[in-house]
Image (cartoon, coloured by chain):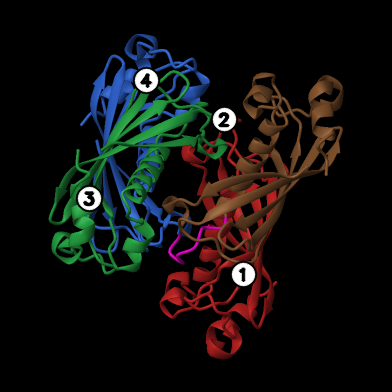
Chain colours: A red, B green, C blue, D brown
């Protein structure tokens, strides 16, 4: 399963190189994975209400072509790893006008509670776990 | 009492006009008022631990000269109003190299608890209230 | 003419009060006005190519109800003033689920060139000027 | 050569997990490398005036302990690779109160001109190149 979300870049995301500031790609990744989860029936907001947080523990991004102001971008998201206390997403940022790959990245997350203590997600939230594992790449 | 904090603008704060994106001035105002409070003996972090939050209810800013990347700026902060459930701060952003006034703004805040319900701050936190009122403009 | 744009709040826009950080409303205003301009046939990106910038010179926002993570918001945008070297937009932020007014604000802009010098927009860009003035509130 | 810069986290950088939003670490890395360059006699702003930009082409960060609001952090920066058209920096984020390592990351950059075309930096800016290579790890 690979999910696609479309966004338009914002002026506030540009920098004085006249490109999108690189750290913003990670906020797009976040939009991609939230939207992915929503599509398979999981609202991240609800997970938090149930005392499950997904803080980021490892991220990376390679930038091939700079995104610019007002670009329409497709965020492609998939889950590549799912373990007892960990989940990994991978992302591609595609420019809509010409289908070029602008950037590629990943984020790894732990399953923790609000005190930031690890949670055995598979055990405690088996239904959600199954929804995720059915959508592994 | 007027308090001064010095910051340096960040590359991430620029936009493609090669000036600092206007919304960032409000994050500088926040640095100014946090630092002001710290100086008079109040840590905003501790206020939150004691279940007092200061959400923003009204803000404004006038921009005279654009701040640019790598500028050293002085944030001048003062308290101009203090009432039972409200506090107002005013700010000036000064460029350090030539002492020019770049922008001027204000923020109004309510005193609320974590459920965002108003709190009679003067009654409940009389010591802190007195520290604030002694530092009114 | 009043234009509506729908957005969803991002996790990156929240703060530790569990509400949206106040400065982000100004980036939403920017989305609203860009989208407004696009709808009446003006691409802000193209204006910049033609050496017209619209830096912000005065802004304000009143906050009534806090926007939260994952809220769907409607940004209502209109032009309220248009003069030789100035334009003013007004905005309302509406929560989609219950139609409540969360915040209300304005931004004033100058017409300048890339050197940040004022431009007589009405004279130099009369066609665009007319498009704008036909869409004044 | 390893350079240290001290910053304090901002309220605007928190998210509703009550930790610093992960993408902000990359803006701290940027502060670290700008400050590193300044210390060895290179102002990044001046490089840009001379038509040299350093866009990011690859980044990564591992998060061990979450930074929180109002933390004082030390950013440790060093140059680990310097080639004809590439430079790599590595960073550590240390919490000042207890000297704990919060996060560790890297950024790789190309040397390009304002049209984003690669530049042979070593040839064209040999003096600056030598300043950098003397400060390689």
State which mark lies toward you, 1 or 4.
1
Q: Where's the C terminus of chain A, which quadrant?
A: bottom right
Which mark is on residue A16?
2
| Front-lying residue, D114 or D2 | D2
How far is the residue under mark 1 from the one under mark 4?
Answer: 48 Å
Is residue B114 shown above or below A26? below
- For the residue labelled by badge 1, is the local secondary structure a helix, a strand or a loop? strand
Residue C128's label in the rendered image is 4
Identify the residue at image location x=75%, y=28%. D117
Give the chain of mark 1: A
Mark 1 surroundings within 10 Å by alpha-carbon count, few (fewer than 14), some (14 through 19), many (20 or more): some
The stretch of residues the image draws in magenta is D15-22
The local crowd at label 3, few if under 14, some if 14 to 19, many if 20 or more residues have their Cα within 10 Å, is some
Horizontal arrangement in the rendering, residue D67 relative to residue D125 (left or right): left
Q: Are marks 1 and 2 in contact (CB under 8 Å)?
A: no
Helix, strand or loop at mark 2: loop
**Mark before the other along the chain sequence, 1 or 2:** 2
How far is the residue under mark 3 from the one under mark 1? 42 Å
Looking at the picture, how far across and down is residue D92, in whole percent?
A: 68, 54
Q: How far apart are marks 4 and 3 (CA)?
A: 51 Å
Q: Mark 3 points at which residue?
A: B132
> Label 4 lies in what chain?
C
Q: Does the magenta stretch include residue A92?
A: no
Give the CA distance from mark 3 to mark 2.
40 Å
Residue D15 visible in rendering:
yes
């Amino acid at each position: 399963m690979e999910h696609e979300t479309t966004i338009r870049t914002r002026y506030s995301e540009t920098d004085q190189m006249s490109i999108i500031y690189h750290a913003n790609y990670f906020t797009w990744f976040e939009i991609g994975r939230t939207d992915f989860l929503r599509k398979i029936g999981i609202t991240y907001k609800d997970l938090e209400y149930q005392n499950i947080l997904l803080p980021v523990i490892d991220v990376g991004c390679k930038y091939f072509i700079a995104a610019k102001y007002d670009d329409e971008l497709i965020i492609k998201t998939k889950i590549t790893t799912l373990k007892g206390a960990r989940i990994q997403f991978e992302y591609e940022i595609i420019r809509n006008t010409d289908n070029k790959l602008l950037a590629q990245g990943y984020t790894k997350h732990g399953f923790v509670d609000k005190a930031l203590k690890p949670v055995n997600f598979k055990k405690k939230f088996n239904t959600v776990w199954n929804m995720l594992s059915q959508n592994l790449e």
